[in-house]
């Protein structure tokens, strides 16, 4: 049966209205995306490269596009339900009310999540309203225009929007957090952005993300149509089934890709490097012939740490005093099937080596990859003249960003080891007990600090710790938040509660008077520009304390930067990826690098005696040894390549890399003499 002219006209008009609504919503997404690009160029904690900026801009733009299209569609739907419709003046009012509330209601440092959520809603309302107004303007100006002119008008308004946002936020005058007042940088690796390239790559990233979204929509539609053919009815009756099918398909693809990445990282974390293929010949070290754990059961980081133990002769030569052979015990993931088994391995190794007969023992809580900070361990060994035992228990072999789910396991294992330590110490005569210390880095800090949740400053003392140093504690760590309480980041830190000290930045620690510093037994150290203690999901929807007014921001926080929902979150995530790029042998202060501060922090907080000239020699040795091991690993790996042509290429690359580490002039690879000196430098 044919349609009447009226029905045909109605269908055409409906289709036209639908197309117009899609067009205006898409334009709104484009303009909010342009605002996101303008905001994404604000500096944050660390410098970033062109690729970093492109990723930040791309993710920000794609997210803003999605928010604006949904929000604009919601506004359009109101036009059919509210008398007289939601017109441009109405959207202008929404914009003014949204931004007005966000500006008028000051942000409190410890405000409630509800108040922060309301402010976020106001900001989104203002942003969606503004993007819808820009969409209306673009649509009006381009009405009846040719395709090219339409595109030119839309692109022009988008460019103006991005530029206006860029300048409105004061970006040209803002400075990165790693920059000192004199213009120098904390970081030993400085990155720069080429704006044109960044914008171009960002457009590609945005297109990829939007393409994925469109693929999901396409897959959902096809699944709905297939369900209609199988079960009957219309495709619209099976929208939920279609969405679930598309989501499940996407989840399978993502899971498979993620599993492949994790498998690759796990293989690397458990692999054996040429430089550490031979087990240690010291009975005091796990993995030796006398050990309860075979060398084959150790992970990559375990082998590195155990292989690099100082010898009594090296300590004597440097400290110019008699020394003992230090003890190192390590339980890898492969050393036991359960957390109880791995804890038992550590305790068995400590018993075997008679660790409790030493003057000091220290639990080193490793990072997610199993890495134990060698600077802290070697400082401990030097300052105790080798009369010590260092031990660690591994909870993951993946980078920390992939090991977050392993934190509870790490804490359980650590608690089991500590329980065993306390049990043994309590059986000893108090005057014969070794001093008990703890060190944690990054995710390892969170793992060990989690034992003290809700115990306040008495937590470490409760397990018999004499002192502890934690560096770069992640923001998700509850115990640190509990200790921080309601204090303001605008105020210089003071010692407390009890003998715990939580400096805002390393500068606070340096400025602390000697008599106050002498009181500190538990130090939670962090750099002002370290993103690890600052990154968290709350950055998506609320302003952090370190982005308050410029005069209240501690050293290391960016100056002139404004918090922007989601964008600040992405920027800080990228900063995390750039937070640790050390040059072997050169100790820099900044980001997530604490090598420069660790030796003196250990000496002061753990209460060791050492003359200034001895500390100077310790510092020099730490740098030499780091460069030695990094160069040895790089050169031996290149030399292990079996194919002659590929080996020559790998050795050339290793020479160039080592040459850069040594500070050779650009293009000057390491010489044979330099390589020989490095190999003998210990």
Image (spheres, grey):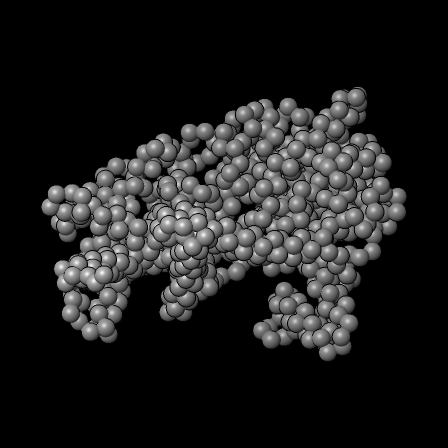
Q: Quadrant of residue 659?
A: bottom right
Q: Quadrant of residue 581?
A: bottom right
- Residue 170: percent from left, percent from top: 29, 55
Residue at the limit of the structure toward the left, as seen here? 84
Look at the image and tell me whether residue 103 can be seen.
Answer: no
- Residue 537: percent from left, percent from top: 45, 43
- Residue lying at 60% horizontally and 56% vertically, measured from the top left: 261
User: Number of numbered discs present?
Assistant: 0
Look at the image and tell me whether residue 680 can be seen.
Answer: yes
Is residue 628 shown left or right of residue 500?
A: right
Specify the quadrant that holds the N terminus. Answer: bottom left
Residue at the limit of the structure toward the bottom, as seen here? 645
- Residue 63: percent from left, percent from top: 37, 53
Q: Nearer the viewer, residue 413 or 238?
A: 238
Residue at the limit of the structure toward the front, as seen here? 1
Please say if 543 is above or below 652. above
Q: Nearer the viewer, residue 385 or 572?
A: 572
Q: Quadrant of residue 47?
A: bottom left
- Residue lying at 63% horizontally and 25% vertically, measured from the top left: 461
Specify the quadrant that holds the C terminus. Answer: bottom right
Q: Nearer the viewer, residue 43 or 663?
A: 43
Is residue 33 shown left or right of residue 521?
A: left
- Residue lying at 55% horizontally and 43% vertically, measured from the top left: 472
Please say if 60 is above or below 336. below
Residue at the limit of the structure toward the right, as seen here? 290
- Residue lying at 14% horizontally and 50% vertically, measured from the top left: 87
- Residue 644: percent from left, percent from top: 76, 77
């Amino acid at each position: 049966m044919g349609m009447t002219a009226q029905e045909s006209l109605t269908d055409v008009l409906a289709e036209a209205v639908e197309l117009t609504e899609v067009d205006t919503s898409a334009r709104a997404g484009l303009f909010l995306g342009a605002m996101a690009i303008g905001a994404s160029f604000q500096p944050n904690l660390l410098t970033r490269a062109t690729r970093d900026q492109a990723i930040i801009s791309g993710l920000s733009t794609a997210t803003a596009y999605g928010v604006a299209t949904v929000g604009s569609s919601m506004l359009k739907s109101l036009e059919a339900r509210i008398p007289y419709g939601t017109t441009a003046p109405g959207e202008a009012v929404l914009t003014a009310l949204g931004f007005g509330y966000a500006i008028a209601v000051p942000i409190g440092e410890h405000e409630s999540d509800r108040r922060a959520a309301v402010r976020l809603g106001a900001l989104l309302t203002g942003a969606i309203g503004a993007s819808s107004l820009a969409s209306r303007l673009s649509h009006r100006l381009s009405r009846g225009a040719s395709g090219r002119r339409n595109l030119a008008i839309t692109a022009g308004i988008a460019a103006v929007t991005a530029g206006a946002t860029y300048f409105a936020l004061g970006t040209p005058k803002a400075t990165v957090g790693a920059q000192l007042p004199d213009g120098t940088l904390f970081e030993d690796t400085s990155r720069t952005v080429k704006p044109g390239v960044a914008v171009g790559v960002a457009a590609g990233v945005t297109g990829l993300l939007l393409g994925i979204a469109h693929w999901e929509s396409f897959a959902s539609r096809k699944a709905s149509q297939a369900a209609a053919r199988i079960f009957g009815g219309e495709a619209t009756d099976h929208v939920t089934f279609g969405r679930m099918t598309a989501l499940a398909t996407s989840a399978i693809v993502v899971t498979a890709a993620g599993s492949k990445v994790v498998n690759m990282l796990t293989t690397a974390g458990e692999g054996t490097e040429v430089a550490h293929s031979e087990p240690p010949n010291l009975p005091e070290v796990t993995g030796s012939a006398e050990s309860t754990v075979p060398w084959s059961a150790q992970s990559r980081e375990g082998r590195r740490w155990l292989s690099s133990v100082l010898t009594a002769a090296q300590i004597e030569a440097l400290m110019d005093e008699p020394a003992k052979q230090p003890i190192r015990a390590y339980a890898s993931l492969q050393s036991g099937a359960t957390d109880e088994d791995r804890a038992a391995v550590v305790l068995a190794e400590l018993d075997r080596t008679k660790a409790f007969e030493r003057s000091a023992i220290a639990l080193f809580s490793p990072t997610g990859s199993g890495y134990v900070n060698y600077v802290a361990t070697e400082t401990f060994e030097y300052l105790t003249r080798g009369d010590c035992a260092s031990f660690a228990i591994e909870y993951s072999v993946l980078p920390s960003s992939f090991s977050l789910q392993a934190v509870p396991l790490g804490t359980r294992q650590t608690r089991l080891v500590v329980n065993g330590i306390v049990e043994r110490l309590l059986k000893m005569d108090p005057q014969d007990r070794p001093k008990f210390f703890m060190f944690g880095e990054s995710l390892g800090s969170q793992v060990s600090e989690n034992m003290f949740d809700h115990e306040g400053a008495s937590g470490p003392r409760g397990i018999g710790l004499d002192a502890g140093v934690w560096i770069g504690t992640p923001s998700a760590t509850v115990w640190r938040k509990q200790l921080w309480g309601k204090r303001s980041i605008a105020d210089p830190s003071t010692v407390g509660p009890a003998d715990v000290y939580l400096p805002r930045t390393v500068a606070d620690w340096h400025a602390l008077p000697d008599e106050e510093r002498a009181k500190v037994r538990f130090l939670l150290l962090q750099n002002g520009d370290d993103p690890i203690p600052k990154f968290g999901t709350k950055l998506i929807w609320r302003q952090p304390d370190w982005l308050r007014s410029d005069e209240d921001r501690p050293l290391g926080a960016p100056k002139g930067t404004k918090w922007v929902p989601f964008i600040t979150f992405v920027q800080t995530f990228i900063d995390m990826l750039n937070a640790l790029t050390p040059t072997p042998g050169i100790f820099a202060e900044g980001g997530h690098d604490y090598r420069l501060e660790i030796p003196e922090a250990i000496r002061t907080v753990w209460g060791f005696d050492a003359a200034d000239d001895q500390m100077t020699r310790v510092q020099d040795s730490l740098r030499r040894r780091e460069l030695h091991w990094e160069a040895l690993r790089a050169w031996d790996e290149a030399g292990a390549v079996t194919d002659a042509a590929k080996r020559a290429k790998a050795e050339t690359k290793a020479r160039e890399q080592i040459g850069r580490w040594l500070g050779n002039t650009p293009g000057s690879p390491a010489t044979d003499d330099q390589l020989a000196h490095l190999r003998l430098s210990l």
